[in-house]
Amino acid sequence: MTLVECLQRLERLQVNAIKAKNLLTVHLLGADHREGNTGAETFEVFRTFTHHVATRMRVTSLQLVLVGPNLSSKLHLQQVLQSYKKSNDKADTTMCHVDMRYFVGGFEAYFNDKMLYCPPDLIVCFNAGIWGYDEWLPAIRLVLREVQVPLLITSYNEHEAEDDEDVLDKLTPFQWLWRPEKNLYGASTPRATDNEEGRILKENNYWMCLTGRLQ
């Protein structure tokens, strides 16, 4: 539901990149096994989102591009297709094609491969922890300066969200669409963790959104 609510909120904000269109492309940066080790698993993880896009939006083709060095190596450059159909008296017709693509590596390498790169409408970093990993900074700068579409970042808790915000505030210029706040659609069950500070970690517990496209 996090991605569903993100799209709806961006529409309410009248963000140009998320307008009614036939093709919607979402990049998932830092993807790993939690987003699936097979196409079938990925489709199941994002079933709520893909079903919403197929049935509630005027989208006939949805592209999910999963990019990250920690994806299963067997997924590199794989493309998996699914579809949503509706039935009538005569035949089944396709409402929306779902195209899942994988790139095992960093976003910079994917961006620079123009044979593979699909321009996104939205970029998402789930539980990225950018405050703790300098490796994120080149990718975030690239998204803000070159790609310039909404960037959704989620965090495990309020403390980490504030740390992420501090890092991002140093990467100006960009525009905040919303600063860190509680995500009502985040996980309700804490992760099992050996966190040294003893803080509770919940998937997508806080979220924030920004764009390099200044308005």
Image (cartoon, helix red, strand yellow):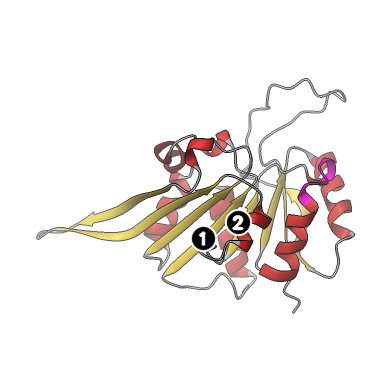
- The tag on residue 36 is none
Residue 46: x, y in percent?
Answer: 48, 45
Residue 148 is at least partly visible in this image: no
**The disc labelled 1 sits on which kind of residue?**
Leu
Left or right side of 153 for 197: right
Left or right side of 91 for 42: right
Q: Which residue is mark 2?
A: 110
Tell me if label 1 and label 2 are in contact, CB under 8 Å: yes
**The disc labelled 2 sits on which kind of residue?**
Tyr
- Of callouts 1 and 2, which one flags the residue occurring earlier in the amino acid sequence? 2
Residue 15: x, y in percent?
Answer: 63, 72
Q: Which residue is mark 1?
A: 116
Residue 135 lies in the magenta stretch: yes
Q: CA distance from mark 1 to mark 2?
A: 7 Å
Does 67 appear above or below 146? above
Q: Nearer the viewer, residue 145 or 209?
A: 145
Q: Residue at x 53, y 36 (%)?
A: 73
* Span colored in magenta: 131-136
Q: Nearer the viewer, residue 110 or 178?
A: 110
> In which quadrant is the C terminus drawn?
bottom right
* Label 2 packing within 10 angstroms: few (<14), some (14-19), many (20+): some
